[in-house]
C-alpha cells in the first residue's frame, strides 16, 4: 500500500483520498477483505468522476481521475483473492476494469507539438539524428 502513497507525487493518487481510505480500512479491522472493498469502491468512484469530467469536456481532469482510478483498482486487484469471489474470473474482470481506467487516462489527452503535427521535428527536441550503422563501422 506504500505504492499508492508514493504515487501521489506523480498524480497517480491523491493523498486525501488515500488517507481517508486507510481510515475506513482501519475502521473495518485492517483486513485484506476491507482493503479490497475500500480500494475497489474508491477506484470505481474516481473512475465515475473521470467519466463525468470527460463528458463535460474537462480532459485534464478526466485524465487525472482515470490515472488515479487505475492506481486504486490496481490496489484492489492485489487483494482480490481476499474478496467474496476469489476466482480467476473475478480477478480477470477486475484487471479489465483497471486496464480500462489506465487506457482512459492515456487517451483523455494527446501530446501536442509546436508544429501541430503528431511528430516533432528533431530541432525542437535538441536530439541529433542517430548514427547510421554500416558493416564497415563494425570492423
Image (spheres, rainbow, N blue to C red):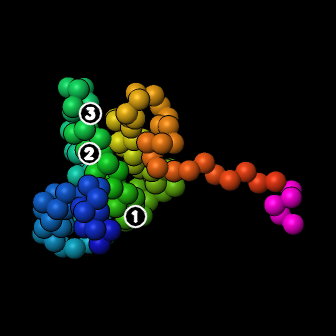
* Front in this rendered view, residue 42 or 57: 57
Give the SS element for disc 1. helix
Mark 3 = which residue? Answer: 59
Number of residues whose C-alpha sits closer than 10 Å to that of mark 1, classed few (under 14), some (14–19) or many (20 or more): some
Where residue 128 appears, x then y in whole percent? 56, 50
Residue range highlighted in magenta:
135-139
- Identify the residue at horizontal 20%, vertical 26% (top origin): 56
- Identify the residue at horizontal 77%, vertical 54% (top origin): 133
Task: Tell whether position 137 is magenta.
Answer: yes
| Res 35 seen here | no
Give the SS element for disc 2. helix
- Identify the residue at horizontal 34%, vertical 35% (top origin): 108
First along the sequence among labels 2 and 3? 3
Mark 2 = which residue? Answer: 64
Contact (CB < 8 A) between labels 2 and 3?
no
**Figure check: 33 above or below 115:** below
Q: Say which mark, if any, is on residue 25.
A: none
Decide if residue 90 is on the left or right side of residue 70: right
- Identify the residue at horizontal 12%, vertical 60% (top origin): 16
Where residue 69 appears, x then y in whole percent? 29, 49
Q: Quadrant of residue 57?
A: top left
First along the sequence among labels 3 and 1? 3
**Main SS, magenta residues:** helix
Quarter in which the N terminus is drawn? bottom left
Q: Say which mark, if any, is on residue 78.
A: 1
Amino acid at each position: 500500500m506504500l505504492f499508492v502513497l508514493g504515487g501521489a507525487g506523480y498524480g497517480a493518487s491523491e493523498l486525501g483520498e488515500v488517507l481517508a481510505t486507510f481510515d475506513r480500512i482501519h475502521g473495518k479491522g485492517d483486513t485484506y477483505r476491507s482493503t479490497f472493498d475500500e480500494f475497489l469502491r474508491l477506484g470505481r468512484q474516481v473512475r465515475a468522476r473521470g467519466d463525468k469530467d470527460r463528458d463535460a469536456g474537462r480532459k485534464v481532469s478526466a485524465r487525472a481521475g482515470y490515472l488515479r482510478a487505475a492506481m486504486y483498482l490496481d490496489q484492489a486487484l492485489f487483494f482480490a483473492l481476499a474478496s467474496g469471489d476469489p476466482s480467476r474470473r473475478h480477478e480477470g474482470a477486475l484487471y479489465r476494469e483497471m486496464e480500462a481506467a489506465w487506457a482512459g487516462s492515456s487517451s483523455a489527452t494527446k501530446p501536442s507539438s509546436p508544429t501541430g503535427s503528431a511528430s516533432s521535428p528533431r530541432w525542437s527536441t535538441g536530439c541529433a539524428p542517430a548514427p547510421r550503422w554500416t558493416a564497415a563501422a563494425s570492423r
